[in-house]
Amino acid sequence: MKFHISTDKDKLDIQTVHKEVTSTYWGKGRSMEETMMTIEKSTCFGMYDKNDQQIAYARMITDGLIFTYIMDVIVFDPYKGKGLGKRLVEHILNQQGVKKVNTVALKTMDAHSFYENLGFKRVGDSKMWMSIERVKYD
């Protein structure tokens, strides 16, 4: 499937992003105002098909040196199960502001094996936190 990824927030289909995110366990109850705030305060990644229709979304916050937090990774129906989520997260991990940070983190309740295949490991005894740690502390 041909697709492209953009960080241009003006291209986002905000209504669809809101609908998709609020249909998840982590976004349930989020208001449109809250969705707008998360978009405003984050670097957002929209994935688009050849017709420029949005088919996936994710966002991150990073300081570009120490920490990156990836959130709201979601592939829209009917595009789920086609490897697009993996490609979207790989794209984020390959961003200049992410490649060199000490820690890349995220939370999930149900996609541990998906993220483990991308290099994330569970954090301690947490049922949700996962990270890629690039610096060892003694």
Image (cartoon, grey):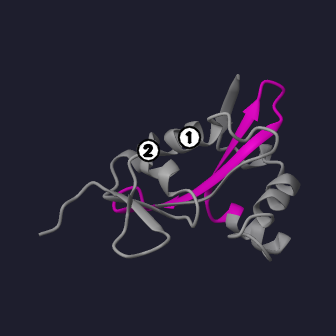
Question: Residue 108: which quarter of the image?
Answer: bottom right
The mark that comes first in sequence, 2 or 1, is 1
Q: Can you tell which of label 2 and label 1 is closer to the viewer?
A: 2
Name the spot of residue 97 as percent of width and height, x first. Answer: 43, 49
Q: As displayed, is residue 120 above or below residue 25?
A: above
The answer to whether residue 126 is above or below residue 68 is below
Apparent side of residue 6 relative to residue 129 in the rendered image (left or right): right
Residue at left offset 79%, top offset 40%: 54
Extreme-left residue of the structure: 138
In this rendering, the count of numbered labels is 2
Q: Are marks 2 and 1 in contact (CB under 8 Å)?
A: yes
**Regarding mark 2 in the picture, which secondary structure is present there?**
loop
Quadrant that contains the N terminus: top right
For disc 1, the marked residue is: 86
Disc number at residue 117? 2
| Amino acid marked by disc 1 | Lys
Whole-percent x, y for residue 84 in the image: 64, 37
- The region drawn magenta spans 39-68
Residue pictured at 33% horizontal, 48% vertical: 100
Q: Nearer the viewer, residue 71 or 115?
A: 115
**Quarter occupied by the C terminus:** bottom left
Identified at 69% across, 63% down, the residue is 40
Q: Residues within 10 Å of mark 2 (few under 14, many from 20)?
A: few
Left or right side of 132 for 5: right
Q: Residue at x 68, y 39 (%)?
A: 81
Instruction: Depth check: give the residue in front, 81 or 49.
Output: 81
